[in-house]
Image (cartoon, helix red, strand yellow):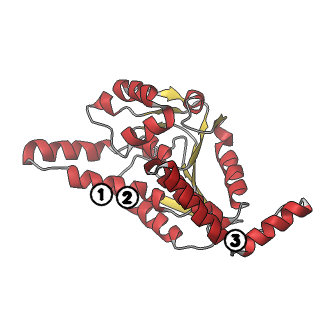
Amino acid sequence: MGQVDVERRDGGVAVVTLNDPQRRNAMTAAMGRALHDTFTALGDDDALRVAVLTGAGPAFSAGGDLGMLEEMTRATREDGADATAAMRTFYARFLALRDLPVPVVAAVNGHAVGAGACVALACDLALIAEDARFGLNFARIGIHPGMGGSWFLPRLAGRQRAAELLYTGRLVDGATAARWGLAIAATPAGEVLARALQVAGEIAASAPQVVRQLKRSLHETWDRTLDEQLDAEAGYQARNYATDDVVEGLAAARQRRTPRFAGR
């Protein structure tokens, strides 16, 4: 049992668990390295169809480890160190989930605060516990948001809502977070992982090559014009027409049955 555990489920689903419950899965450099290595290894698995990210114990993640932040502060104030490169490396390790070629579903089983909330927002989809505390409290501890918080939040919650949450550092409950578009649904805490696995199973039942294409397409659409996105869609569809899966999908549609995609 390390700081990050992986459990393979049927149907090409992997459950990745942040596993430091005694510290509410606080994000350390060691956890970041472990998470980066985990997602790098999963990315090389052609059989993988979807990943679920959750936390061990009652919290998803309490955010950046306070000891690490205190050491960064000491090194900066006493030694004149510049923490910019260290922070960028720290972010990159946790955000390696963005490079996974398949969707990542966050099962936010409990509190997700600061950088922990950012990691949940970085996932493709999120389910959250109704009574979880969720928010980016960086301004309350004297630090500008990191881990992509000021990039993800406006895109999900809108400019004004993001501004309010970032300026105030306010935490909201999971039901409110879902209502504001930060998760697709809020459920009782004990049901979050099961609901996330249900969503993961539905994703895994879709054509694997198409889902991988969609992961890229949805990430890249923010930087494209409509014409550029239409070109990308046409190119993806042209490749799909050569696959066995489109033959299976069309046959299943005609026969009114569930398709059985092989990923070819």
Q: Name the quarter where the C terminus is drawn.
A: bottom right
Farthest-out residue, left: 79
| Between 230 and 181, the one nearer to me in the picture | 230
| Between 97 and 210, the one nearer to me in the picture | 210
CA gap between label 3 and label 1 equals 40 Å
Q: Disc 1 residue type?
A: Thr
CA gap between label 2 and label 3 equals 36 Å
Q: SS class of the residue under badge 2?
A: helix
**Label 3 neighbourhood size at 10 Å, few (<14), some (14-19), many (20+)?**
few
Residue beneath the point at 43% across and 35% down: 154
Residue beneath the point at 21% across and 46% down: 71
Q: Is residue 203 above or below residue 152?
A: below
**Label 1 neighbourhood size at 10 Å, few (<14), some (14-19), many (20+)?**
some
84 sits left or right of 98 in the view: left
Which residue in the structure is indicated by mark 2? 93
Q: Are marks 3 and 1 in contact (CB under 8 Å)?
A: no
Which residue in the structure is indicated by mark 1? 89
Quarter-of-image position of residue 50: bottom right
Tell me, for residue 241, which label it has, or none. Answer: 3
**Rendering coords of residue 42 (x, y %):** 53, 68
Q: Is residue 185 visible?
A: yes
